Image: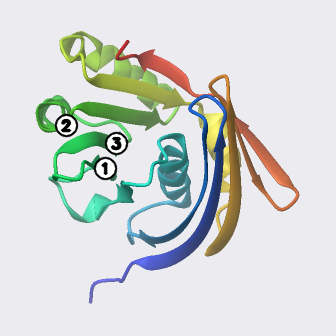
Amino acid sequence: MAQNATIYKVELSVSDMDRHYYETHKLTVAKHPSETDKRLMVRILAFALNAHENLEMTKGLSTDDEPDIWQKSLNGELELWVTLGLPGDKVIRHSCGKAKEVIVYSYGGKTAELWREKTQNSTTRFDNLQVTNFSEQDIGELEKLASRSMKLQVNIQDGDVMVSVDDSIVYVTPVKWKSTE
């Protein structure tokens, strides 16, 4: 019998001084049975970094042709495609052809660095692709904050991120490996 997704309730307050975005999102996040707490927290962090009224979590791991997060315009065009992990060339090519902007949030320490070396040359042609990496240490600390009911406060300033839950604070420093600028 297949396992069901675990439901997480997240109240996500985002204060993004870089984009002048200040809003609270109430999210119901389905954690796929094969998804780790680490990946779940990266997904929530990616949502916070791109927070917008039209941003949505998708089915993610349960579908191959959807990103983890997307933002569509009012007429249904894909404005933003967010993928987590270490996607292959085919996935990157597919997503860059479908969306105006594509962001890959990689993590995984040495494995992510090897992935970067492997894909670096084949991704230079995509002007709409951004790749941002999270250190293994930052994501390991973030993973410890995971619980089925969370009230997260995310503050973003000068590219640095502070995530707090109650008295626990985690600092995350995203590193841009490839920029759209």
Q: Are the two marked residues, 1 and 3, in contact with CB atoms closer than 8 angstroms?
A: yes
State how far apart marks 3 and 2 are (Cα).
10 Å
User: Is residue 115 among the parts visible in the rendering?
Assistant: no
State how far apart marks 2 and 1 are (Cα).
9 Å
* Residue at position x 42%, y 62% in the image: 35
Identify the residue under disc 2.
99
In the displayed structure, 159 sits above or below 146; it is: above
Query: Could you tell whether 32 is left or right of 62 in the image?
Result: right
Q: Considering only order in the chain, which callout, 2 or 3, is on the residue closer to the N terminus?
A: 3
Q: Quadrant of residue 82?
A: top left
In the displayed structure, 172 sits above or below 110; it is: below
Amino acid of disc 1: Trp
Give the crowd class for mark 2: few <14, some 14-19, many >=20 residues within 10 Å.
some
Amino acid of disc 3: Val
Residue 166 position within the rendered picture, expressed as x and y whole percent measured from the top left: 83, 62
Q: Considering only order in the chain, which callout, 1 or 2, is on the residue closer to the N terminus?
A: 1
* Residue at position x 18%, y 12% in the image: 125
Q: Can you tell which mark lies on residue 70?
A: 1
In the displayed structure, 58 sits above or below 3; it is: above
Identify the residue under disc 3.
82
Q: Quadrant of the N terminus?
A: bottom left
Secondary structure under badge 2?
Answer: loop
Query: Could you tell whether 52 is left or right of 80 in the image?
Result: right
Residue 51 position within the rendered picture, expressed as x and y whole percent measured from the top left: 49, 47
